[in-house]
Image: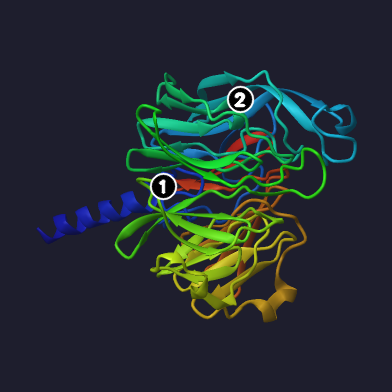
C-alpha cells in the first residue's frame, strides 16, 4: 500500500514537473513563472534542439502551448515604404518606416515535431502604421485548451478552435500609433480582455470568449500617436489578473499610472499616479504579496479610489521594454543593455550590484524574464538565452546562442523551451 501511494505521488510530481502548459504570453500565472522542475539549462543551434521549423517572416510574438499544440501569430506579405513617401508620416517623423500587411495569421504546430498543422489568415488591405522593429502581430495569442484567440491590431480579434475553425471575429476599429501595438489578450473566466492601443483612440475591451460579443469597454483618454510628428506617448503593456484581498483584479498601466479594474465589469477600483503627458509604458505590471509594481514603482494595494499615497518609497529596478519576474522574495530585472539585477521585493535592496564586473551583458534585450526550475531565463536580441541561478547570490549558469535575431520572450512547457526568432520556431529539450 505504501509503495502504491509513493508511486502515485511520484507520478503526480512528474506530471507537474514536466507537464505544464504555457497558455498565454507570460505563462500560467501571467507573470513569467513556471512550476516545472525539469527544464534545459544549456543548448546551442546544434545542441539539445528537438526541432526547429522555418517561419515566413520576422515577428516578435511569443508562442503559447497547450497539450500537443503550439500556436504563434505571424504577419507576412508586407510592403515597406520609406517615411518620406508615406502619406501618414511626414518626412523625418517615422523612425524605421511603416508598412501595409495584407496577411495576419495564427499558425498551429505539432509540439512533438514542429509540423505545421494549420494556418488561418486574416486579410487587412488598409494601411496601418508601425515601426520596422515591431512587425504586425507582435501580440501573443492566448488559449484555454478549447480555443485560441489572437489580436491582429486594426484587423481585430479572431478566435479559432483547435482544428482551425473560426468561431468568431471582433472588429476593434482602426488603431493608429507611429510604433504600432503589441499588447496581448488575457483570459478571465468567460472573458477575453484586450488593451486596444496605444494612440489617439484607445480602450480596454472585454468580449465573451465563446461568442465574441462585447461585454464591456473602458475608454482611456487618447495619447499623442506621433502620426503628425512631435511628442508621442503610449502603453504597449499587457494587463495581468491578480487576487487582491480575496477579489480578482485586472491590473494595467499607462505612462505614469497604474489602475485596478473589476475584470467582470470594467469598473475602476483604484488608481495610483496620474497619466503622464509624455513617456511610454512597455513592461507589464507585477504583483506579489499585496504589492504591485509598474516600471519600478511599488504601490501597496487594498485601498479604493486614488491610492497614490500608498506608493512605497523604495524602487525596484526601473525596466525598459522587458518585464521582470518575481520569484519568492526577489524581483529579477534585465535592462536594455543586458545587465541582470536582483532586488529584495520588500525592501528594494539591490543584491547583485557589487558583482557587476562578472555579469554578461552588452546585448539589447526586448524579451521578458522567465523563472523555471530555480533559474532565471532571458533571451537577448542576438538569440542568446542567458541563465542565472534564482536567489540572492549572483551565479551565471549558461549563455546559449542560437545566432538568430529575436525580440520575443521564451516559453516553457512540458519540459521544453520554445523560442521564436525572426527565422524559426525552436523547440529546445534535453534528451529524455
Q: Which residue is mark 1?
A: 266
Give the residue displayed 78% in from the left and 50% down from the top.
231
> Which quarter of the figure has residue 335?
bottom right
The image's colour scheme reads rainbow
Visible in this render: residue 391? no
Give the residue displayed 66% in from the left and 49% down from the top.
234
SS for callout 2: strand
What whole-number distance in Å separates the C-alpha atoms at marks 2 and 1? 29 Å
Give the residue displayed 64% in from the left and 27% down from the top.
75
Q: Nearer the viewer, mark 2 or mark 1?
A: 1
Q: Position of residue 195 (x, y in %)?
A: 53, 43
Quarter holding the N terminus? bottom left
Residue 120 higher or lower than 393, as above or below: above
> Which quarter of the figure has residue 131?
top right
- Disc number at residue 325? none
Extreme-left residue of the structure: 1
Give the residue displayed 63% in from the left and 43% down from the top.
198
Earlier residue among tags 2 and 1: 2
Label 2: how many residues lie within 10 Å, few (<14), some (14-19) or many (20+)? many
**Front residue of this view, candidates 233 and 145:** 233
Visible in this render: residue 64? yes
SS for callout 1: loop
Q: How many labels sit on residues?
A: 2
Q: Position of residue 54 (x, y in %)?
A: 64, 29
Residue 181 higher or lower than 326, as above or below: above
Q: Which residue is mark 2?
A: 104
Label 1: how many residues lie within 10 Å, few (<14), some (14-19) or many (20+)? some
> Which quarter of the figure has residue 428?
top right
**Front residue of this view, candidates 173 and 410:** 173
Q: Position of residue 406 (x, y in %)?
A: 68, 43
Amino acid at each position: 500500500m505504501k509503495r502504491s501511494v509513493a508511486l502515485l505521488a511520484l507520478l503526480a510530481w512528474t506530471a507537474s514537473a514536466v507537464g505544464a502548459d504555457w497558455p498565454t504570453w507570460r505563462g500560467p500565472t501571467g507573470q513569467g513563472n513556471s512550476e516545472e522542475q525539469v527544464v534545459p539549462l544549456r543548448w546551442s543551434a546544434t545542441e539539445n534542439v528537438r526541432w526547429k521549423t522555418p517561419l515566413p517572416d520576422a515577428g516578435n510574438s511569443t508562442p503559447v502551448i497547450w497539450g500537443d499544440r503550439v500556436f504563434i501569430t505571424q504577419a507576412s506579405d508586407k510592403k515597406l515604404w520609406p517615411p518620406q513617401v508615406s502619406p501618414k508620416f511626414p518626412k523625418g517623423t517615422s523612425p524605421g518606416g511603416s508598412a501595409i500587411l495584407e496577411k495576419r495569421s495564427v499558425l498551429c504546430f505539432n509540439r512533438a515535431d514542429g509540423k505545421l498543422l494549420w494556418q488561418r489568415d486574416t486579410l487587412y488591405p488598409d494601411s496601418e502604421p508601425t515601426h520596422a522593429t515591431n512587425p504586425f502581430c507582435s501580440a501573443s495569442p492566448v488559449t484555454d485548451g478549447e480555443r485560441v484567440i489572437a489580436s491582429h491590431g486594426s484587423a481585430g480579434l479572431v478566435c479559432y478552435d483547435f482544428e482551425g475553425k473560426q468561431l468568431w471575429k471582433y472588429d476593434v476599429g482602426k488603431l493608429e500609433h507611429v510604433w504600432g501595438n503589441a499588447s496581448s489578450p488575457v483570459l478571465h473566466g468567460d472573458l477575453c480582455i484586450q488593451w486596444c492601443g496605444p494612440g489617439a483612440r484607445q480602450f480596454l475591451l472585454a468580449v465573451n470568449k465563446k461568442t465574441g460579443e462585447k461585454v464591456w469597454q473602458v475608454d482611456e483618454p487618447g495619447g499623442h500617436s506621433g502620426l503628425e510628428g512631435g511628442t508621442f506617448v503610449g502603453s504597449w503593456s499587457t494587463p495581468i489578473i491578480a487576487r487582491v484581498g480575496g477579489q480578482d483584479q485586472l491590473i494595467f498601466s499607462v505612462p505614469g499610472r497604474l489602475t485596478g479594474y473589476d475584470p467582470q465589469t470594467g469598473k475602476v477600483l483604484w488608481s495610483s499616479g496620474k497619466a503622464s503627458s509624455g513617456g511610454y509604458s512597455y513592461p507589464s505590471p507585477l504583483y506579489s504579496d499585496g504589492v504591485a509594481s509598474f516600471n519600478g514603482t511599488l504601490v501597496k494595494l487594498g485601498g479604493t479610489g486614488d491610492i497614490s499615497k500608498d506608493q512605497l518609497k523604495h524602487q525596484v529596478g526601473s525596466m525598459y521594454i522587458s518585464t521582470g519576474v518575481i520569484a519568492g522574495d526577489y524581483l529579477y530585472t534585465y535592462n536594455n543593455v543586458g545587465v541582470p539585477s536582483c532586488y529584495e521585493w520588500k525592501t528594494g535592496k539591490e543584491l547583485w550590484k557589487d558583482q557587476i564586473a562578472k555579469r554578461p551583458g552588452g546585448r539589447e534585450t526586448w524579451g521578458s524574464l522567465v523563472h523555471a526550475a530555480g533559474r532565471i531565463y532571458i533571451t537577448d536580441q542576438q538569440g542568446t538565452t542567458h541563465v542565472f541561478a534564482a536567489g540572492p547570490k549572483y551565479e551565471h549558469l549558461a549563455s546559449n546562442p542560437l545566432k538568430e535575431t529575436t525580440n520575443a520572450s521564451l516559453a516553457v512547457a512540458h519540459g521544453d523551451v520554445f523560442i521564436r526568432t525572426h527565422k524559426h520556431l525552436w523547440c529546445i529539450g534535453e534528451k529524455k
